[in-house]
Amino acid sequence: MTGSTADDRWALVLYVDGASTSSIHAIETVCRVCDQELGDRVDLEVIDVRQQSARAARDQIVAVPTLIKRFPGAPRRIVGDLSDSSWLRLGLETGSAGISGEDRDSGE
């Protein structure tokens, strides 16, 4: 950990379905938001439900893409379309969600 404490680390798990369009958009958006908002304070694990079905079952994943915030704070699930980074920021409660509805697939 470079300059961060365990208390300010984020642990996220993103469940996707192979190379589906929605999964690709989810991966791109989550990675972009993590880079912009959390920098080196995030541990992001991407899990393909086709390759790790037992893990998906253990975490009770019923739809993909699903992003699970394990910590900080209470665990939280964001399910469905993750291509809008403003909604993703709002769901993660990063503190900088400017809801515009216009950044979908724009690459900001």
Image (cartoon, grey):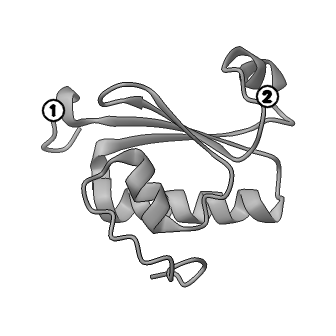
Q: Is mark 2 on a helix, strand or loop?
A: loop
Is 26 rendered above or below residue 107? above
How crowded pointer 1 is (Cα within 10 Å; few <14, some 14-19, many 20+) is rated as few
Residue at the spot x=81%, y=46% of the render?
Answer: 17
Question: At 48% from the left edge and 57% from the top edge, which residue is drawn?
Answer: 88
Q: Which of 17 and 39 is in front in this view?
A: 17
Residue denoted by label 2: 52
Q: Is residue 53 left or right of residue 39?
A: right
| Label at residue 47 | none
Q: Earlier in the sequence, mark 2 or mark 1?
A: 1
Find out whether the residues at labels 2 and 1 contact each other: C-beta distance under 8 Å: no
Residue 22 pos. (x, y %): 75, 61
Task: Give the residue type that dot 1 points to.
Answer: Thr
- Quadrant assignment, res 13: top right
Residue 35 image point, x, y percent: 37, 61
How packed mark 2 is, by other alpha carbons closer than 10 Å (few <14, some 14-19, many 20 or more), is few
Residue at image location 12% in from the left, 44% down from the top = 3
- Considering depth in this image, is 46 or 97 the residue closer to the camera? 97
Q: Position of residue 62 (x, y in %)?
A: 78, 31
Identify the amino acid type marked 2.
Gln
* Picture quarter with the N terminus: top left
- Regarding mark 1 in the picture, which secondary structure is present there? loop
The residues tagged by marks 2 and 1 sit, at their Cα atoms, a distance apart of: 31 Å
Residue 5: which disc? 1
Instruction: Count every numbered label the image shows and give the total.
Output: 2
